[in-house]
Amino acid sequence: MAESDADAVLVHRALMLMYVETQIAEVNHAKVMRKVFELMTGDNSAILMAMSGDALAGTASVVKTETWFADAEFFIDKWLWVAPEFRDGGVLRRILEELRDLASHVGIPVLVTHNKGRQIGKPRSQFERIAEMAIFQPRGLVLGYFP
């Protein structure tokens, strides 16, 4: 778990790389750092860090929220990112296992959005074809763990 100023700096650097990859919007560095500190110190949030020596190999953040349609609470990710040189599956598995353990410990589900980045080629489903006609771009899927 991220706990120190040094951790926040490592996470911020990783997020800058993630945002370059996803190309969702222009990044406001100060806003990102404020959010990192908010999630790192919040009572209902956490930042996970997968280290490889001194390097941050991957990171994820979750925040507790509730659905608009029911009284159920769950964790939803703010981000999940693995550095390109660590994308053999081991780091991602460690992060997902930590998220699973957190959800089990607290007793509420965790939902993770898988962002595949910009999609090239034929959409996979009717929903994606319709969304593409409306100028939406497929961005992934949601995965869940329910303790």
Image (cartoon, helix red, strand yellow):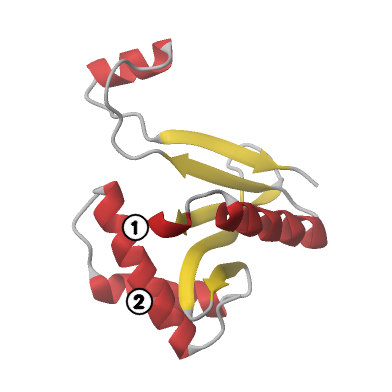
Q: Nearer the viewer, residue 91 or 7?
A: 91
Residue at 48% of width from left, 66% of height from top? 57
**Mark 1 residue type:** Met
Which residue was labeled with disc 2? Answer: 33
Q: Position of residue 29 (x, y in %)?
A: 25, 72
Drawn side of residue 28 relative to residue 38, left or right: left
**Mark 2 residue type:** Met
For marks 1 and 2, give the CA distance: 14 Å
Q: Residue 2, labelled with which disc? A: none
Drawn side of residue 7 relative to residue 105, left or right: left
| Vertical arrangement, residue 34 with respect to residue 77, above or below | below
**Residue 83 visible to the viewer:** no
Report the residue that reaches farthest toward the top.
126
Which residue was labeled with disc 1? Answer: 18
| Vertical arrangement, residue 143 with respect to residue 12, above or below | above
Residue at 43% of width from left, 34% of height from top? 140
| Vertical arrangement, residue 38 with respect to residue 107, above or below | below
